[in-house]
Image (cartoon, rainbow, N blue to C red):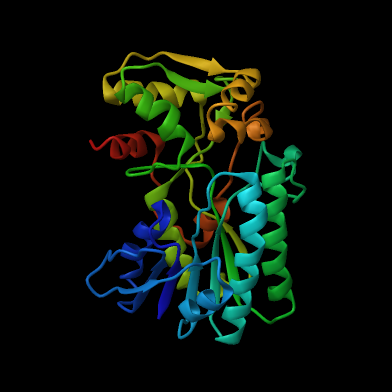
Amino acid sequence: MQTILGANGTIGSVLAKELTKFTTNIRLVSRNPRKVNDTDTLFAADLSDEKQVEKAIAGSSIVYLMVGFDYNTKVWQNNWPKLMRATIDACIKHNAKLVFFDNVYMYDIKEIGHMTENSAMNPPSKKGAVRKEIVDMMLDAIKAKKLEGLIARSDDFYGPNNDKSFLIEVVYKNFLKGKKANWFMNENLKHSFTFTPDAAKATAILGNTAEAYNQTWHLPTDANALTGKQIISLFANEMKAEDKFSLMPIWLMKVLGIFIPFMKELPEMMYQYDREYIFDSSKFGKRFPEFKTTTYAEGVRLTIGK
């Protein structure tokens, strides 16, 4: 049994399709799980309850932790450590491997220009501190040889049917509405993005590759990173939209945060947009050379449905 915790999410639902290449025994877990494949087993659970987490994991050989909490610092501080602890403990108890779908928030600000699996972890934000805390929990359990697990780390992502992506929210959706795109800080800096179908496919491959465990992996991402201006132009050209954008300064985010809770969460993350932001996934590419990473041009076409 391979189990996805947070199966209704952007990545979890695509992962369920990709796992059929390895097994038909898939359990989908969320508050209101929905079948992706005909053979899926549905397991409704409140993952804030450690007892329900254990029940969801019992009988699993591999567990994929794909949960996405609301983008709110307090929610992360309250929920992530509890969920990670419950998941690790249940995986140990039931002898299940753990695959954790992670982000890059825990990396030192000096590493942002070239992030690798060996980049120093020294988070410059409160959200990053939460991510480091839960990553350390998992790495400690692996180091103590109590847990067999791997970290599948993604860059900021974009792709079809994706409502959790900054790029989709401020570029694609704005163009759909006939508005200018938005960008943060500096449009002339390169910024990597991971294509969600690539991330899901690679996570399935890693989870079913024995020697991939007890390591961290950057998920495959086009090495030819584009500037904000270039990626906005890609969307504009494919959508036949006017190639225009406006930059959103930090002070405006803070003002908008008074009325829009999501905007209140963004200022502490703006260090990711005031410098080059390059995500290096060459480790994955060397181990899985047959994997074809989607280019930005193709990814944008697929995202808008062409």
Q: Which residue is pictured at 56% across the width and 23% down the height?
A: 256
Q: Does residue 238 sit above or below 261 in this rendering?
A: above
Q: Position of residue 124 (x, y in %)?
A: 75, 41
* Residue 275 placement: quadrant: top right
Q: Does residue 138 sit above or below 260 in this rendering?
A: below
Q: Is residue 53 visible?
A: yes
Q: Position of residue 120 (x, y in %)?
A: 75, 50
Q: Position of residue 216 (x, y in %)?
A: 62, 61
Q: Position of residue 94 (x, y in %)?
A: 55, 86
Tag count: 0
Q: Is residue 304 left or right of residue 261?
A: left
Q: Is residue 4 left or right of residue 155?
A: left
Q: Quadrant of the C terminus?
A: top left
Q: Does residue 103 sit above or below 149 in this rendering?
A: above
Q: Is residue 188 left or right of residue 136?
A: left
Q: Which residue is pictured at 69% across the width and 47% down the height?
A: 128
Q: Which residue is pictured at 41% across the width and 13% down the height?
A: 244
Q: Quadrant of the N terminus?
A: bottom left
Q: Is residue 141 left or right of residue 159?
A: right
Q: Is residue 292 visible?
A: no
